[in-house]
Image (cartoon, rainbow, N blue to C red):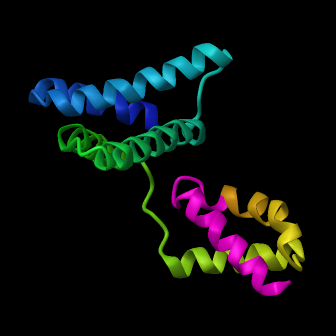
Amino acid sequence: MSLKQRLTDDMKAAMKGGEKDRLGVIRLINAAIKQREVDERIVLDDTQVLAVVEKMLKQRKDSLSQYEAAGREDLAAVERYEMTVLQVYLPAQLDDAEIDAIIAAAVAEAGATGPKDMGKVIGLVRPKVAGRADMGVLSERVKTKLASLG
């Protein structure tokens, strides 16, 4: 079943179950997907839908940190809830050992010798971890690994 179909089914279930908060988040996801499809005049596949969900999750994380810094616990709680719903649609996250193994394999494959090869390594790593790791954290780990080489 495609991710878009799963979202539609979950939206129907939330409507029937009276889960207004969850329904609202799923509708936000569907609206973001539809907006991108209309803007780009394409039909999104599962990989592109994942990218939309990841972007929404990143936005929620940014908002959460700002709300917490401002002492707005009411708004922070809303962001936390939306993040839990968004994470349901992402694949299982990779653990540190798996990320390190993927980075090491990409460094070897690219023949990377130092920080100047960051773009090559990230280019190889990104498709392997799509939706399963935070790209900001991943980027820092690649940078650290390459710095140790050169």
Q: Which residue is drawn at 61% across and 79% down?
A: 100
Magenta run includes residue 148: yes
Of residues 148 and 130, the one nearer the viewer is: 148
The magenta stretch is 128-150
| Residue 15 sits above or below residue 65 on the image | above
**72 left or right of 144 in image:** left
Of residues 51 and 139, the one nearer the viewer is: 139
Secondary structure mostly seen in magenta is helix
**68 left or right of 147 in image:** left
Quadrant containing the C terminus is bottom right
Quadrant containing the N terminus is top left
The picture quadrant where one finds residue 97 is bottom right
Residue 24 x %, y %: 26, 26
Q: Residue at x 9, y 27 (%)?
A: 18
Residue 138 x %, y %: 61, 65
Q: Which residue is drawn at 40% across and 31% down?
A: 5
| Residue 126 sits above or below residue 12 on the image | below
**12 left or right of 112 in image:** left
Q: Residue at x 78, y 77 (%)?
A: 146
Residue 88 x %, y %: 33, 48
**49 left or right of 74 in image:** right
